[in-house]
Each structure stands twice: as structure tokens, then as C-alpha cells.
Image: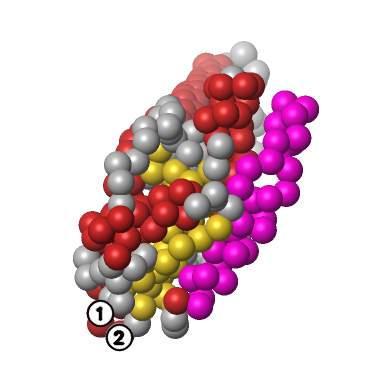
Amino acid sequence: MESSPPPSSPSALGARETVVLAREEAADRREEAADRREDAADLRDTAADEREATNRAATQHRANKESHLREANEQLVVTAVHAQTMVEAAEHATLQMSFKAERDFLTGLPNRALLTDRLAQSIALAIRHGKRLAVLYVDLDNFKDINDSFGHSVGDQLLQSAAKRLQQCIRHSDTVSRQGGDEFVVLLSEVESAHDAARVSEKLIKAMAKPHLVADHPLTVTLSIGICLFPDDAGDAETILTNADTAMYHAKRVGGNNYKRFTPDMNATSVERPTLHVVR
């Protein structure tokens, strides 16, 4: 029977060296594998950082874009509102200019130009529908005395008070116009007969007779009214106004505080009217 070689023999040494080398190689491979795992982990971390950075950039970009869009929308809204405001201001200015062009500055009543326009429209409607209309030419009796005694400021306030009372006595479809000074014209756009115009005239005289409290002064004025009917007494706007004015002067000449309907003989007896009215 053969015996094993002693530990110090060449064969035993070679086997141990082989085991040592194998162990070293295994250790090297484990170290390399650990290095590769570490490198892979670094790559994953780097990729995660890059993704996070990309996401942050994308989020910031969206936020910036949304902010810019909001600012643009807000600017558009501001611009639109400003443009609308400018349009409304221009329209308001136009309406104001139109209003001032058609209104008496003291009383706010329609002026002569607007009355002429409304009278022409009322005549056209009366012709179309076979109706009558009436014009009442109204003058405040003794207004000049009040104006001279108390001053223009009190006179102006009295005219404003008189204008309000005249308006309160008519329908919404009718018109009260200030012609200037202490003269007014009432357009009754539709009447059945001269009786209707007379009834309104009586109503105006009664309403005006109540004292007007102006600057602590109880002032009383009366009215002289001239009536002209279309188509009975005149066939056009200018003649209607002229005839109503003539009838008013005849009412004033017999003492005032009354009304007269125009008749053709008034033209034969008419005289030049005194210029007593103060126009402001």
C-alpha cells in the first residue's frame, strides 16, 4: 500500500497555490461585480437626477407658459374693457351733445328745433290716421315785472317751476317746449275736438295759479294761452305756430289768465307785439 506524500512535498504545495489563486480570482471577480453594481447604481442615480431635472424644467416651462397666457388674457381683458369704456364714453358724449342740441339749457325741455321735428311727425301721423292735433302757445303774464323786481336768478327758478307744472298737466305722448324767455308751447299730439284743447288749457291755468315758492318768495303768475288746431285752423307746422302765437297775444291783450282759440279775423286785428320777453 502506497503512502500519501508529506505536506512539504511539491505536490501538496502546488495544490495549495492553486486553491489560493482560485480564491484570489474569486475575490477579484466579486470585487469587479461589486464595482459594476456600484457603477450601475451611479448610473441609475444619474438617470433619476436627470429625469427629475427634466420634470422640474418641464413643470417650470408649463408654469411659465400658463403665467404668460394668463398675463396675455388679462391684458386682452383690460384692453377690451378699455375699448368698451372708450366706446361708451364716446356714445355718452354723442348723446349729451345731441341732448344739449335739442334741449333748453335752463328747463331741460325740448327746444324750438326739437318741437319743430315732433310737430312735423305729429302732423304726418294726423294726416295718415285722419286725426286732429292742437298747439297751445303759452306765455307767463307779468313775468317781466317779477324778473325786474327779484332778479334774473329768481326769474330763472320761476321758469323752471313753471316748466315742471306744465309737464305735470299733459300726457306722456304730448310735448312741452320752451321757446325762449317766458314763452312755452304745448303740443297735444292727438285730440278729438277743440274742446279737448280748451280743457287742457283750463287745467294749465288752474295749475299755474298756485303760488310758486322761489327763494322764500311766494310768487304767483297766470297764463295767456293761444290755441290752434290742425287741420281746422292751419295746414302746416309754421302756420300752426304762428296762429297759436297770434291767439295767445289776443288772450293777453284782454287781460291774460285765459285762453283763446285762433280765428281768421284775429289776423285782421293783430298788432305788433311788444318785445317784453327776456330771453336767456
Q: Nearer the viewer, residue 42 or 114?
A: 114
Give the numbered dot on residue 130: 2
The residue sitting at the top extreme is: 8
Residue 203 magenta-highlighted: yes
Quadrant in which the N terminus appears: top right
Quarter of the image where one finds residue 65: top left
Which region shows up in magenta?
195-223
* Residue 209 in the image: above or below residue 227: above
Disc 1 residue crowd, few under 14, some 14–19, many 20+, Cα 10 Å: few
Q: CA distance from mark 1 to mark 2?
A: 5 Å
**Would you say residue 23 is visible in this rendering?**
no
Q: Please state if 264 lies on the left or on the right of 260 as rendered.
A: left
Task: Give x and y (percent) for residue 94.
Answer: 32, 39
Task: Give x and y (percent) for residue 218.
Answer: 75, 35
At 22% from the left edge and 70% from the top edge, which residue is drawn? 235
Q: Amino acid at mark 2?
A: Gly
Quarter of the image where one finds residue 119: bottom left
Residue indicated by mark 1: 127
Q: Amino acid at mark 1?
A: Ile
Q: Are marks 1 and 2 in contact (CB under 8 Å)?
A: yes
